[in-house]
Structure formats: structure tokens, C-alpha cells
Amino acid sequence: MFILCVLATPKAFAQDPYENIIQINGVTMTADSLRAVPGVTVLVLSKDRGVESSGKGVFSIVVYKGDTLQFSALGFRNKQYVVPKDLKGHYFSLIQLMVQDTFYLPETIIRPVPSREQFDYAFKHWSVPDDQLELARRNTNALTLRALAYTMPRDGRENQAAYQNQQAVLSTYYGQQKPMNIFNPLAWAEFYEAWKRGDYRKKNRVY
């Protein structure tokens, strides 16, 4: 009995590692007219690999039994196909029908301009609604940019320039004491004129 079990064990556990591999050869076609759909992306979900159908809609891909294929193309709805687990053999043929995806664009009315004079008048006087170009002009207005400049922090280049200017001013008085405005006669003259004008008087506030 023990000998029979030992002899049966290799056969029971011996399994072909390529048994679950399937090569799928197929073609992608339209569902209504059965025309070839080129450029369809055939992707194996949960795996980072896939193929693209040829100009005649033909594709070939190697997968495992139980894998899910996703078919996607511009202008068509996505389709999924689950490879059956009970397939016999290692080759399988597939015809995948693609359904067109209908979408509508916004309405555009084109009106002819009869003459050059009317075109010139319309170009000068017609009011054109705000578009992306007008929004760009507003955003690049000088006053708007100036207001934003006061609130935006300095970048690396501006910080470097400010630091270099500060170091240049400090190097001017290197080796000596930096002068103070209390000994500056021009500052005293400006203070005297401001005192005469009454800039330092207390003003009655009206609430």
C-alpha cells in the first residue's frame, strides 16, 4: 500500500506549468457593419501589458486562463472579455465586436459675410463675448500684476539679490562705525521743518 502511494505521488503532483497559458488570436470589428477596427488597445487587466490591433484589426496576445481582457478605442465603448478557465488546448480565436460611442458636440452656426466692407465693420464694432483670450488679457493687466506682486513671496533669485544688496551696503562701512542720523545735519533740518509745519501736533479726531 505504501509503495502504491509513493508511485502515485509524482503523477498526482506533476503538473505542466504551461497548462494555463493561452494564445488568443483575434480581430476587432464594428458590431453594426462588421468592419475592421484598427488601433484597438487590448489590455490584460491587473497586469501591466497589452497589445494593439493592426490596421486590419488583427491582434495576438498570450494570456492565462481566467484573465480579463479590456478592449478600448477612440469613438467606441470599452469592452471586457474573460478568458474561460475550461478551455482545451493552448490556442483560441476571438472576434470582438466594438460598439460605437455616440457623443454630441456643441452647436456651431457659421454665417457668411457678404462683402469686405461688412467684414471690416463687424471686425471693428461687433461685441465679441469674453473668451479665453480676454481672460488672459485681464489676468496680465499691469495693475493686477502689481497688486499680486505685493502679496507674493520672493523666489530664490530675488532673495539672493536682496542678500547681495544688503552685503554690499554693509561692506561700504567695513572697518568703521556706521553713521547715525542723530548726527546728520540734513536730518535735523528736515525735523525742524516738520516741527514748524505742525506734523507732530495732536490732531482732534472726529468719530
Image (cartoon, rainbow, N blue to C red):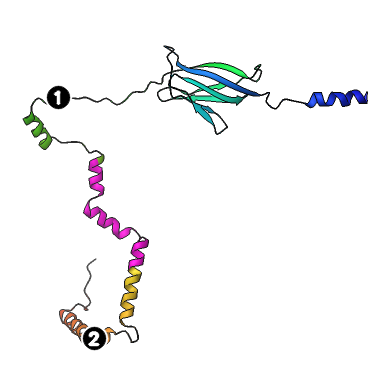
Q: Give the residue drawn at x 19%, y 81%.
A: 190
| Quadrant (top left, top right, bottom left, bottom right) of the C terminus | bottom left
Is label 2 in a helix, a strand or a loop? loop
Instruction: From the viewer's perspective, tell me whether residue 153 is left or right of residue 42.
Output: left
| Residue at 33% over, 63% down | 158
Q: Is residue 202 above or below residue 67?
A: below
Looking at the figure, which quarter contains the N terminus?
top right
Position in image of residue 34 (x %, y %): 44, 12
| Mark 2, residue position | 184
Query: Taking the image as drawn, is residue 67 in sight?
Result: no
Residue 22 image label = none
Residue 3: say if magenta: no
Can you see residue 145?
A: yes
Where on the picture, by quarter, is residue 90? top right
Amino acid at dot 2? Asn
* Circle nearer the viewer, 2 or 1: 1
Q: Tag 1 or tag 2, which sits nearer the N-term?
A: 1
* Residue 23 relative to residue 195: left or right: right
Residue identified by numbered label 1: 112
Q: From mark 2 to mark 1, how far is it between C-alphas?
A: 77 Å
**Element type at mark 1:** loop
Residue shown at 31% from the left, 77% from the top:
169
Q: Position of residue 170 (x, y in %)?
A: 33, 78
The magenta stretch is 133-161
Residue 56 percent coordinates (x, y):
44, 18
Q: Which amino acid does label 1 sit on?
A: Pro
Q: Which residue is drawn at 46% across and 24% down?
A: 40
In this view, 196 is above or below 73: below
Contact check, label 2 and label 1, Cβ < 8 Å: no
